[in-house]
Image (cartoon, rainbow, N blue to C red):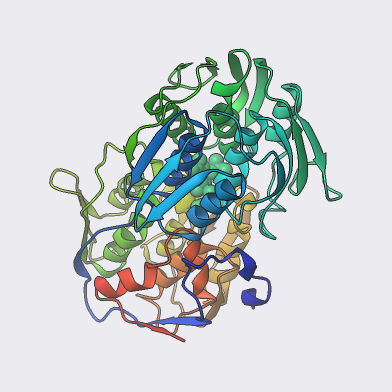
């Protein structure tokens, strides 16, 4: 199964270790709980990298303690940045654009954010490093970012037979600035990456988007973070064109918000069991796109309360299907929706998510494999799937070393007796405490 393919070197000391399977026991009644979710991966890794580049010291609170954050911190330390972690507080002494160690090996782990953002942050300084990721990260696309950095005067030399992936040797004397054209059709992280290094370019940098951006909101999160650390950025609301001045960043105290993507699994648990779950530490005004998953749940018959503290989802007696839903702008929740869909009263058609084939796994292929294994009909297209309701029988499911696969399969186990998730430790990429949190809302999980 997948654990044979899993890259255990990318599991950090903060990971959930020594578990090979998780058996989820079906809910015996509606889940009824309040829960608090850990810090956002997207905010954690942006804040760490921007604080490292900045002039002065930053104190970050609400850090996510997961593999993605751990490898981001280790990479910064390997570059000579002084980063001190104390629980979920971190102090980062910024380097003002000059990396103390100007040579060496930088390991990004499995995080797309670290791989894309740090490559650009390094390119904005001076030095010669090899950059490599986990087995899967070394397969994920980097080409658009590489071409952009090359156009800005950076040397990028592939260390594998593929020119568009890690590992590479990066040889730089800084970014030129000027005007570049970029595609956001495969990953928004290329755009965020190019933006993050830009305040240290020699001249202002203008990025023009030639097509679309798969998840605009993450670029807005980048722009907000840059501005919070003193960056000067101009952009239109649709993000056709963005201009960054070469002002550098200034360190500051910054509180990292909770992770909306993690919250979705708990709302899905309410949706599937006709129960109620309130995630207490998120508001609908967050820029994180996945918070809008509650609107998808509403379309499927859930009631959503956004007015009090946090956001509460109340599941219906029967989930409604029959919709075509574009998950383009919140595509990390495609798996969650796909694994709720068999329990709706009509087929659910998910569209516009071809790019998730390049995430931690080929997520559209994994949706088909998982659902077909439990007896559910799925039609696969290049950019989506249609899922049909039907009776399901639990079995051992491969998590493909993909945290979101493991988390979404686990939630499905609330309705399908016999779901066993192989290599559940992969949840550690963004939520090592996932099974503990499931326990807190009353789900019974046998880990062995
Ligand atoms: O910038 C970010 O923090 C992220 C951007 C998205 O990636 P893509 O734009 O590559 O899909 C998202 O899927 C990922 O989980 C986090
Ligand atoms: C796509 C994801 O991660 P990454 O930041 O590695 O791209 C994800 O968390 O679902």
- Classify residue 439 by image quadrant: bottom left
| Camera-nearest residue between 421 and 151 | 151
Count the marks.
0
* Left or right: where 238 falls relative to 178: left
Residue 287, position as x, y percentages in the image: 36, 36
Q: Residue at x 26, y 47 (%)?
A: 282
- Classify residue 312 by image quadrant: bottom left
Q: Is residue 187 visible?
A: no
Q: Residue at x 32, y 54 (%)?
A: 300
As drawn, the residue found furthest toward the right would be: 161
As drawn, the residue found furthest toward the left would be: 308
Q: Is residue 139 visible?
A: yes
* Left or right: where 78 falls relative to 410: right
Q: Residue at x 25, y 72 (%)?
A: 440
Q: Residue at x 27, y 36 (%)?
A: 285
The N terminus is located in which quarter?
bottom right
Residue 358, position as x, y percentages in the image: 64, 50
| Camera-nearest residue between 442 and 49 | 49
Residue 343, position as x, y percentages in the image: 38, 67
| Camera-nearest residue between 293 and 324 | 293
Residue 259, position as x, y percentages in the image: 36, 50
- Classify residue 24 by image quadrant: bottom left
């Amino acid at each position: 199964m997948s654990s044979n393919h899993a890259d255990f070197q990318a599991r950090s000391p903060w990971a959930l270790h020594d578990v090979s399977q998780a058996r989820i026991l079906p809910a015996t009644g509606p889940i009824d709980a309040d829960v608090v979710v850990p810090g956002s991966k997207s905010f954690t890794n942006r804040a760490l990298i921007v604080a490292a580049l900045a002039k002065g010291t930053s104190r970050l609170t609400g850090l996510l303690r997961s593999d993605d954050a751990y490898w981001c911190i280790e990479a910064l330390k390997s570059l000579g940045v002084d980063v001190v972690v104390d629980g979920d507080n971190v102090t980062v002494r910024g380097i003002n654009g000059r990396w103390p160690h100007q040579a060496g090996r930088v390991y990004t782990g499995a995080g797309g954010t670290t791989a894309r953002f740090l490559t650009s942050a390094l390119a904005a300084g001076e030095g010669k490093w090899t950059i490599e990721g986990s087995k899967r990260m070394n397969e994920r696309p980097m080409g658009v970012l590489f071409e952009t950095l090359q156009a800005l005067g950076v040397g990028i030399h592939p260390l594998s037979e593929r020119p568009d992936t890690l590992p590479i040797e990066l040889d730089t004397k800084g970014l030129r600035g000027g005007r570049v054209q970029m595609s956001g059709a495969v990953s928004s992280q290329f755009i965020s990456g190019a933006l993050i290094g830009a305040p240290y370019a020699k001249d202002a940098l203008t990025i023009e988007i030639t097509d679309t951006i798969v998840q605009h909101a993450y670029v807005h999160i980048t722009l907000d973070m840059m501005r919070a650390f003193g960056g000067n950025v101009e952009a239109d609301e649709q993000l056709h064109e963005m201009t960054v001045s070469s002002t550098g960043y200034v360190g500051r105290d910054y509180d990292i918000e909770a992770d909306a993507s993690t919250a979705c699994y708990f709302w899905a648990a309410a949706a599937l069991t006709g129960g109620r779950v309130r995630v207490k530490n998120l508001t609908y005004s967050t820029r994180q796109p996945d918070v809008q998953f509650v609107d998808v749940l509403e379309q499927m018959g859930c009631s959503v309360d956004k007015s009090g503290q946090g956001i509460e989802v109340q599941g219906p007696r029967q989930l409604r299907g029959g919709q075509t839903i574009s998950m383009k702008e919140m595509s990390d929740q495609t798996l969650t929706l796909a694994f709720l869909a068999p329990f709706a009263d009509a087929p659910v058609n998910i569209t516009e998510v071809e790019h998730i084939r390049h995430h931690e796994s080929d997520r559209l292929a994994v949706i088909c494999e998982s659902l077909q294994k439990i007896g559910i009909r799925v039609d696969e297209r290049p950019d989506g799937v249609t899922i049909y309701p039907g009776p399901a029988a639990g079995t051992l499911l491969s998590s493909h070393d993909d945290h979101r696969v493991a988390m979404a399969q686990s939630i499905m186990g609330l309705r399908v007796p016999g779901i066993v998730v192989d290599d559940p430790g992969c949840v550690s990429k963004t939520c090592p405490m996932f099974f503990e949190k499931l326990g807190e809302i009353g789900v019974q999980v046998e880990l062995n």
